[in-house]
Image (spheres, rainbow, N blue to C red):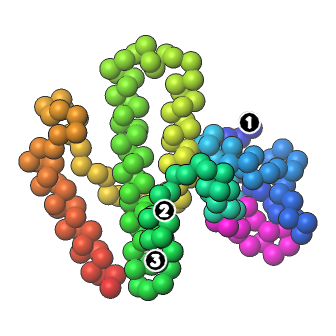
Amino acid sequence: MANSGSTLLIKRYASRRLYNTETSDYVTLEDIAGFIREGREVQIVDLKSGDDLTRQYLLQIVAEHESRGENVLPLNVLIDLVRSYSGTAGSVVPQFLAASFEMLRDGQSKMMENMKTVNPIMANMPGFDAMQAQQQAFIKAMTGSFSGTWSGPGRDDGDTKPGATSDEDLTLIKKQLADLQQKLNKMS
């Protein structure tokens, strides 16, 4: 695919057809989902008005996958999302979700790097890089344009068992939670 580092511009025509400006052909929602899984940034704009429709189409892609039984979002999360649209909590929810996915992305990246160093055979396995790229693209797509600086706790010095938490980590978690609470209080 050409020019994989830049944002792929998709134009929506009045007929609702989606046009890939990079390859000069029409694409489907599944094609767009594929671009995103490959790590591409995608922007969808209305040809006539110039309105950015990216969010609407990404939500439609998620809805189609959910309706086909490819459930990623638990029912209670969907309910909480619907509830977040009413009330003042709505301003906090996007930041919370973005921070959560940022932590997930960091954790997955660390896991993939650890797999490479612990088991070099797996790193050379066909498809390993594609699997890693797909996971990164998924997390990137889910977090949108979040540019926060919070990085979750973690100690990678081998002193603790996987899943174990040291006193140092607990102190760091408490500090980060206090910082988040202060930010939430300022937003209120």
Amino acid at pointer 3: Ser
Residue furthest to the top in view is: 121
Judged by depth in the image, the label closer to the viewer, 3 or 2, is 2
Give the mark nearest the N terminus, 3 or 2.
Answer: 2
Secondary structure of residue under mark 3: helix
In the image, residue 162 above or below residue 53: above
Label 3 to label 2, Cα distance in Å? 14 Å
Looking at the rendered structure, the secondary structure element under dot 2 is helix
Given the image, on which type of amino acid does mark 2 rest? Leu
Q: Which residue position is annotated with label 2?
A: 75
Q: Nearer the viewer, mark 3 or mark 1?
A: 3
Among the 4 quarters of the image, the one containing residue 112 = top left
Magenta range: 44-56
- Estimate how packed mark 3 is, as few (under 14), some (14 to 19) or many (20 or more) residues with alpha carbons within 10 Å: some
Residue pictured at 75% horizontal, 46% vertical? 31
Question: Residue 53, position in %: x, y?
Answer: 71, 67
> Is 77 within the magenta?
no
Q: Residues within 10 Å of mark 2 (few under 14, many from 20)?
A: few
Residue 163, picture quadrant:
top left
Q: Which residue, given by chain and number where applicable, does mark 3 sit on?
A: 84
Task: Say what amino acid the circle numbered 1 marks.
Answer: Met
**In contact (CB < 8 Å): disc 3 and disc 2:** no
Taking the view exactly as shown, the residue that stands out farthest to the left is: 167
Q: Where, quadrant-wise, is the N terminus in this rendering?
A: top right
